[in-house]
Amino acid sequence: MSDSRNKALKAPLRELLDDPIAHDDLERVRRRVHASRRLPPTSGWARAPMLAAAVVLLAGGFAWLALEGDGALTVESGEALASARGEGEAITRVSLSDGSAIWLDEGTAIEASHNDGERVVLAQSDGRAVYDVRPNGPRRWSVRAGPLTVDVVGTRFSVVRRGARVRVELERGHVAVRGEAIGTVHLAPGEHVEVGAPTPPPEPPEPPEPAVPPVAVREEAPALDTPALDTSRPRVARPSSTWRALADRGAYADAFAALGERALGEASRQSVSEDELYALADTARLSGHPRLAVTPLRRLMDEHASGVAALTLGRLQLDALDDPRGATRSLARADALSVPAHLAETLLARRVEAHRRAGDADTA
């Protein structure tokens, strides 16, 4: 974090911590309280046991903090977390020393490639695991599952892996999911991203029409009257429905490949379906093309009064498009349109971040 950010964050705290009582007034109060209690003077020898106890307590506290902040993450047995596997039909819980926990389905395994006081890196095998990472803990977590890596600080999310097919779903907090197929995608609570979904087999080609023998036409035969083509309205080729089936399954990278950038842009401008606009926005955003998601999200916000679309647009402008000023407007619109209760805290935090990054410290 830069020095300017540190100053912006610390200034309000300093104002809250300023003591409004003058030093001279505080000293007079202290003398009056001391005189009213008429306590006998305490010798240095009498204070020695208390000082020694305080030193022991402080030393113990600092020792505990050192172990918590600098040592490796450990399991209930006290050993450093190295690997774990779900055994039996019941879900296996792995309780960790920092208050975090991992639940593993049968056969699901995790292995730590890095584990110290600052960072934990886990690799997950095929199967399902739920990670409940302690918020604001001393360590940064990364979970690698096939082609995806999940970077977290404190949150609860699940990872389901079947070979190259991986699905990450966020329950609370915030995660960044990285992968070659999607770039970096930031998830909000309730959102998910999936890669590697199998592509449906191509539709069989239509059988060729039977050949019709040519009909001889005499040159003197009159020309047939054919209606003129209506050229007053442009004809728009609708994209194939294959992309939509892929998007509905969460395979957004494959959906984008099936749709194509040009067709996605045309559909985003012309579609009248609210449901399709959501699918187009998700396909663009979660396949690593955030700029293409702006048009469908803005239409959902303006034409369908969607507070969730406004919030998503604001997050996109903050995280991927480096447009904090635009984010302040989108997030203010989300607040006016209202969002579900479980997203209210996320919206408030994002509005503060947007105003701070836009230079509106007082508003933030």
Image (tube, helix red, strand yellow):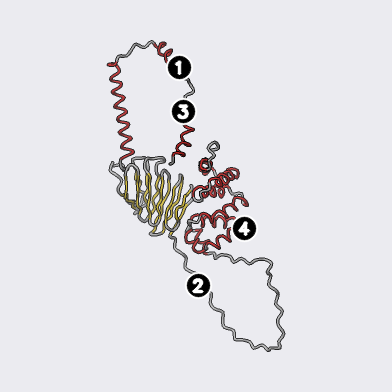
Number of the front mark, 1 or 4 = 1
Packing grade of label 4 (10 A; few <14, some 14-19, many >=20) is few
Three-letter residue code for mark 4: Val
Q: Quadrant of residue 209?
A: bottom right
Q: Residue at the location (54% across, 78% down)?
A: 208
Q: CA distance from mark 2 to mark 1?
A: 91 Å
Which of marks 3 and 2 precedes in the sequence?
3
Q: Which mark is residue 24?
A: 1
The span from disc 1 to disc 4 (Cα, nearest Å) is 72 Å
Query: Residue at image x 70%, y 74%?
Result: 228
In three-dimensional space, the C-alpha distance between marks 1 and 3, rounded to whole angstroms, equals 19 Å
Which residue type carries mark 2?
Pro
Classify 10 Å Cα crowding around label 1: few (below 14), some (14-19), many (20 and above): few
Could you tell me how many numbered marks the image carries?
A: 4
* SS of the residue under disc 4: loop
Amino acid type of the residue tagged 3 in the rendering: Leu
Which mark identifies residue 204? 2
Q: Are marks 2 and 4 in contact (CB under 8 Å)?
A: no
Real-space Cα separation, disc 4 to disc 3, in angstroms: 54 Å
Q: On screen, 318 above or below 51?
A: below
Q: Earlier in the sequence, mark 4 or mark 3?
A: 3
Of the image marks 1 and 3, the number of the one nearer the N terminus: 3
Residue 159: image location, x then y, percent: 41, 52
- Checking the image for residue 17, the label placed there is 3
Name the mark nearer the viewer: 2 or 1: 1
SS label for mark 1? helix
Quadrant of the drawing holding the N terminus: top left
- Label 2 and label 3: CA atoms lie apart by 72 Å
Q: Which residue is mark 4?
A: 272
Q: Which of 313 and 160 lies nearest the eye of the viewer?
A: 313
Most extreme residue toward the front, as rendered? 3
